[in-house]
Image: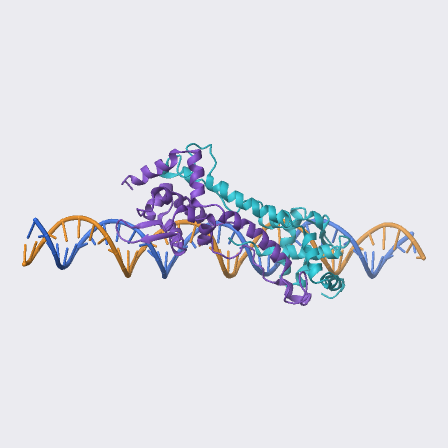
Chain colours: A purple, B cyan, C blue, D orange
Amino acid sequence: MRMNEGVEWAVHSCLNLAWLGEDRAVPAAKLAAFYELPAAYMNKQLQALARAGIVTSTSGPRGGFRLARPPEKITLMDVVAAIEGSEEAFRCTEIRHRGGSGSGSAVSGRGDTPCAIHTSMRKAELAWRRELASQSIADIAATVDEHSPAAAERVRRWFGDTRT
Amino acid sequence: MRMNEGVEWAVHSCLNLAWLGEDRAVPAAKLAAFYELPAAYMNKQLQALARAGIVTSTSGPRGGFRLARPPEKITLMDVVAAIEGSEEAFRCTEIRHRGGSGSGSAVSGRGDTPCAIHTSMRKAELAWRRELASQSIADIAATVDEHSPAAAERVRRWFGDTRT
DNA sequence: GTAGCGGTACTCGGATACTTCCTGTCCGAGTCGTACTGG
DNA sequence: CCAGTACGACTCGGACAGGAAGTATCCGAGTACCGCTAC
């Protein structure tokens, strides 16, 4: 069960966009260059964020991406859902209703009762989602500022530079 | 982020093994036939459970798999870890240390400070793991017995039958 | 000098290859039960 | 009748294909800026 690598890129980019403010747009190529990542693939991740309404995109010169709303309103759950999709990791295929097991193997006598395994898995996954939803981009930015106060300024300086 | 389908099979099989008791071994082919699943692939999942010490395997006639310990001692976390592996879903590749970002982009000034994103992701994942670890096979079996008391007996009857 | 216009460069967005992992299958090694043979 | 032995069948275990999803890339559509030209 591996999470897409793009999630890491997306969260980092959201942090950078948060530090740069919402008054300027940053091209995908620049966000990628900051970490020496493939620009086209970074663009793909940002497109997913745009589709999810987390960032807004503008074309043409001086275009790029910027946060669609304040960092306090963007949770990790939002970003993960944008890249990974909203479906559950555990997919209950209802095998209990197949085969010689008749209609009741591990969980139910009739089709009505929910699959106990599915319920347990969902419970765990909800705990995960709840934890992700409780942390915003602003929270992470605050943590970083606390541990290394120069980080935000360093980002602003690097992106302020016109080279590459 | 999709979980392996084998997890569902493994948990269902653990439930069945729990109902059948630990005094008899059940072949992979029979566990698979119960749900009309491919026997060889089911065998693969059971092998993983065996490597993790959740079930024990015996070869030859009358052989098969049985639970290695009481269902109360087997958690969902154990099963998921056996099939999926123990590594985290979110893989921090430390992109913050690459590229023009120098050595401190989103998280740290030096290599010492932990990646804040990684920390947040891990926190969520730990919540997930904790929830999985809190539920045992016995718990699920109890839930099923509550909702459809006939399930256990039906399983015992089907597996007791020599056909297929 | 100013307004209008065309060209150019830049950006996103989706369509297209390549790699990795999950899914599914196959065959060989080992083991137990059984039947046969000999005493 | 009983013990020993050889055979056969059954099961796990790991090695081997096929397919879906993630990863990476490229090219076209659209847009804003800039310079030029005409008034």
The vertical placement of A81 against A13, above or below, is below
Q: Is residue D14 left or right of residue B124?
A: right
Which residue does the image show at 53% across and 43% down from the upper left? Answer: B123
| Percent position of residue B20, x then y | 74, 57
Give the percent coordinates (x, y) of residue D28: 29, 60
Splitting the image into 4 quarters, where does residue C36 fall?
Answer: bottom right
Tell me residue B28's x, y (percent).
Answer: 68, 57
Q: Nearer the viewer, residue B154 or C32?
A: B154
A104 lies above or below B81: below
Front residue (pair B143, D15): B143
Q: Is residue B57 visible?
A: no
Q: Residue at x 69, y 61 (%)?
A: B147
Position of B92 compared to C5: left or right? right
Task: Give the side of residue B29 with respect to residue A160, left or right.
Answer: right
Residue at (32% x, 48% y) in the render: A27
Q: B121 or B35: which is nearer to us?
A: B121
Count of residue discs: 0
Q: Position of residue A41 (x, y in %)?
A: 38, 50
Q: Nearer the viewer, residue B27 or C36?
A: B27
The answer to whether one can see residue A30 in this image is: yes
Q: Residue at image x 54%, y 46%?
A: B125
Relative to B105, A112 lies left or right: right
The quadrant in which the C terminus of chain A is found is: top left
